[in-house]
Image (spheres, helix red, strand yellow):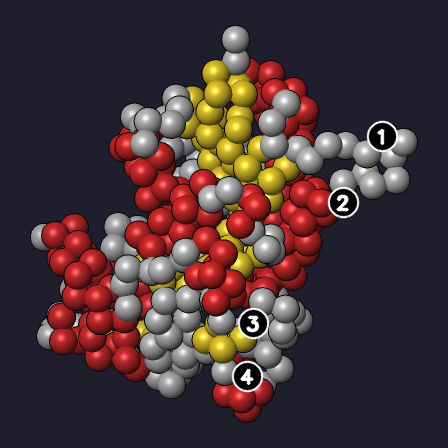
Amino acid sequence: MRASSVLVTGANGEIGHGLIARLAALGRPIVTIDVAPLEPDLARLVRREFTGSITDRGLLERILAEFEIDRVFHLAALLSTRAEFTPIAAHDVNVGGTLNLLEFAHHEGQSHGRPVVFLYPSSVAAYGLPDLDTKTRAKRVREDEWNTPITMYGCNKLYCEHLGRYYAHHYKQLAADPAARRVDFRCVRFPGLISALTVPSGGTSDYAPEMIHAAARGEPYTCFVRPDTRIPFMAMPDAIDALLTLASVPCERLTRTAYNLAAFSPTAAEICNVVQKAFPAASISWDVDSKRQRIIDSWPAEVDDNAARRDWGFAPRYDFAGAFDDYLIPTIKERYS
Ligand code: AKB
């Protein structure tokens, strides 16, 4: 008999670290895919680790043959800055890989007869505001506004939100016997995420976590965006809670497939101030990279997350002060001590 398990792609990444620990604590057998071997602390927690790419359909077929997957957390992606340097590779992984995973989930659902719950982290990068004036006037942007991303990553995320909705509601709609609902696709649009345990790479919202971790390590940091730059952020534990909550809510409660999530929206200068208060020796300077700034300026300062709050009770634990005082600063200090 195939073992019923949860599949996590991009398991070695920032969200994967937190999510795998939580899934293991819940007693769920975990199967992972990542292009790099799992770090030893994570590897101990999983039932089976596959080192390879989500673009490799043969690999997905092997997993299909061996495991009964009833839940997928599809975290693997090339982030916004990296994707601009290699847009075709980004499209292959972010879109091609997601399409493979959706098809995989459909076949899993067909084989065990239950819909596979498919969790997909989209991003605030799915938005694209044309200029700073519009960004200021837009205020709290709703899911269906300003869906005109300017990055390959943002275009990939927005398109995959629609692919997921297609698999969930319209798959093979013209077939003589339209397929039963096999993929239960659920998506959150994450803001920039800040973890106390890992440092991101390849993103454009990375200036916030980089600034904090550099200060804790006693290293100087040069911030690549203007001090008045404002986008939404969230502490990693709230991001993991959101994925787990959305995964377990009855599907009748969901009125959409993609939900905005928000927690706090500080400027880069406000982040710098709290970091400097916590680490008085921190050396933070500013050298604006106008191209990365343009990307950040196209993302909203705030998003409207009323639908997530109403439909499935999303309620982040950490506001700006709490995220730093109760989670980031103490955990990071302990990590580097
Ligand atoms: C990035 O900066 O690319 C990501 C994101 C906001 O999705 N952190």
Query: Marks 2 and 3, Cα distance to the nearest angstrom?
Result: 24 Å
Question: Is residue 242 or residue 13 the one in the foreground?
Answer: 242
Mark 1 neighbour density, 10 Å: few (under 14) some (14–19) many (20 or more): few
Query: Marks 3 and 1, Cα distance to the nearest angstrom?
Result: 36 Å
Mark 2 neighbour density, 10 Å: few (under 14) some (14–19) many (20 or more): some
Circle nearer the N terminus (2, 1):
2
Q: Amino acid at mark 4?
A: Ala
Q: Which residue does the numbered mark 3 point to in the structure image?
A: 142
Mark 2: which secondary structure? loop
Mark 3: which secondary structure? loop
Question: Is residue 188 or residue 248 the one in the foreground?
Answer: 248
Circle nearer the N terminus (3, 1):
3
Residue at 42% from the left image edge and 22% from the top image edge: 48
Q: Amino acid at mark 3?
A: Arg
Q: Amino acid at mark 2?
A: His
Give residue 304's mark.
none
In the rendered image, residue 205, in percent from the top left (x then y), is placed at 42, 66
Mark 4 neighbour density, 10 Å: few (under 14) some (14–19) many (20 or more): some
Q: Which residue does the numbered mark 1 point to in the structure image?
A: 177
Residue at 22% from the left image edge and 71% from the top image edge: 321
In the rendered image, residue 337, in percent from the top left (x then y), is placed at 9, 52
Q: Which residue does the numbered mark 2 point to in the structure image?
A: 170
Query: Marks 1 and 4, Cα distance to the nearest angstrom?
Result: 45 Å
Give residue 138's mark.
4
In the rendered image, residue 127, in percent from the top left (x then y), is placed at 59, 70
Question: Is residue 178 or residue 288 the one in the foreground?
Answer: 178
